[in-house]
């Protein structure tokens, strides 16, 4: 394997969505590797304080649909583009399908166009393994399986992004890479109405509220620590074996939502327990577990953070930044009070 971290020295890298959990940790890793990093983020689902304040990091506030800002950042001639910005995620896209299509569809297309025009050497597109495979794929989920029977606009537009990447790879020769993320968690992700289950569970547990489980609790997810995903992205950004490829960045391990809730309640000392609520209509996947064999073969990806350890890191980050996280939590009016009113179930 090449010295993939050393390959970033003195390179200019654009990270769209760089204020998010994955983006901010990736930005930190790039800066520490000697890259000059341009972060483009509209802060619609993240906070300015989450962007690392490090030498060589330039923050530009704006979205991927703003062509004036795109011209500005591409005038910096990035050698590598990490496109992580997205209208996240399933329920948000069900509630706002047009905005989802604009950001995830047109936004991705514009970044690809500007990358070709400015001579970008590598375009890394953040795809979603939870989107591509549908609900009927056999486990473990492998890259050669795809489904057209998707259950949310977000899943559709994340697949659309992959298809646009394929077009730009074959038609223009743009060196694209398509890592597929699975249930990322870790420091850097604040809770909110449209955020992932782990930050929301930690937030509610720290506030002494019961944790709402949609379904039976026996549903499983492939929770992947953000540090492992970042390592995969850093490899994908420079290794030639990744070009034109799609591959899973996952842990390869299943965890039930019930055991997740119990672990978080125990770690937070939350006696409020859990509450079962109806499953959301778009949530059609009872189990998720990805194969990481292709990523291991192509880029040497090897997830190394045990789930219990990663969860402790994440809870520690919440405690350290609670004075910022609590006022930044983005829930619709009445959501937290509705959770508070739920009677606790036995754990």
Image (cartoon, helix red, strand yellow):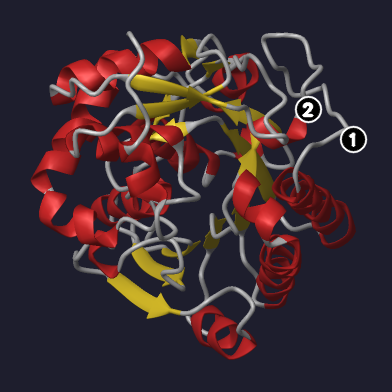
Q: Which residue is mark 1?
A: 148
Residue 125 visible somewhere in the drawing: no
- Residue 89 placed where, x, y %? 59, 48
Residue 131, picture quadrant: top right
- Residue 271 placed where, x, y %? 18, 20
Instruction: Identify which residue, 316 or 152, lies in the foreground.
Output: 152
Residue drawn where x is 24% and y is 24% of the image: 272
> Is 195 placed left or right of 107 in the picture?
left
Residue drawn where x is 59% and y is 86% of the image: 71
Say if 136 sits above or below 160 in the image: above
Instruction: Identify which residue, 198 or 27, lies in the foreground.
Output: 198
Q: Which residue is mark 2?
A: 134
Residue drawn where x is 55% and y is 18% of the image: 296
Task: For mark 2, give the secondary structure.
Answer: loop
- Between the residue at mark 2 and the residue at mark 1, the CA separation in whole angstroms equals 7 Å
- Residue 328 placed where, x, y %? 28, 61
> Is 28 placed left or right of 252 in the picture?
left
Task: For mark 1, give the secondary structure.
Answer: loop
> Is 344 placed left or right of 184 in the picture?
left
């Amino acid at each position: 394997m090449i010295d993939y971290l050393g390959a970033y020295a003195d390179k200019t890298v654009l990270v769209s969505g760089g204020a998010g959990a994955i983006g901010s940790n990736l930005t930190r890793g790039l800066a520490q590797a000697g890259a000059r990093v341009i972060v483009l983020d509209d802060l619609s689902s993240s906070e300015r304080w989450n962007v690392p304040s490090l030498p060589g990091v330039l923050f530009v506030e704006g979205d991927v649909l703003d062509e004036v800002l795109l011209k500005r950042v591409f005038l910096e001639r990035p050698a590598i583009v990490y496109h992580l910005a997205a209208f996240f995620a399933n329920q948000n896209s069900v509630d706002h399908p047009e905005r989802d299509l604009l950001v995830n569809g047109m936004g991705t297309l514009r970044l690809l166009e500007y990358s070709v025009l400015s001579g970008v050497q590598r375009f890394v597109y953040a795809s979603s393994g939870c989107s591509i495979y549908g609900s009927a794929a056999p486990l473990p989920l492998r890259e050669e399986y795809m489904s057209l029977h998707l259950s949310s606009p977000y899943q559709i537009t994340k697949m659309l992004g992959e298809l646009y990447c394929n077009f730009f790879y074959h038609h223009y020769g743009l060196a694209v890479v398509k890592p597929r993320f699975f249930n990322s968690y870790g420091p850097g992700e604040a809770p909110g109405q449209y955020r992932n289950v782990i930050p929301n569970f930690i937030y509610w547990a720290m506030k002494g509220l019961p944790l709402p489980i949609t379904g039976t609790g026996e549903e499983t997810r492939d929770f992947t620590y953000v540090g492992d995903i970042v390592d995969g992205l850093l490899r994908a950004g420079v290794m030639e074996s990744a070009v034109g490829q799609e591959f899973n960045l996952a842990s390869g391990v299943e965890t039930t939502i019930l055991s997740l809730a119990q672990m978080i309640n125990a770690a937070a000392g939350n006696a409020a327990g859990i509450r079962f609520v109806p499953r959301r209509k778009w949530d059609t996947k009872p189990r998720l577990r990805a194969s990481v064999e292709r990523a291991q073969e192509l880029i040497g990806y090897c997830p190394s953070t045990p789930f219990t350890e990663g969860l402790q890191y994440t809870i520690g980050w919440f405690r350290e930044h609670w004075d910022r996280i609590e006022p930044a939590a983005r829930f619709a009016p009445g959501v937290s009070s509705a959770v508070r009113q739920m009677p606790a179930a036995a754990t």
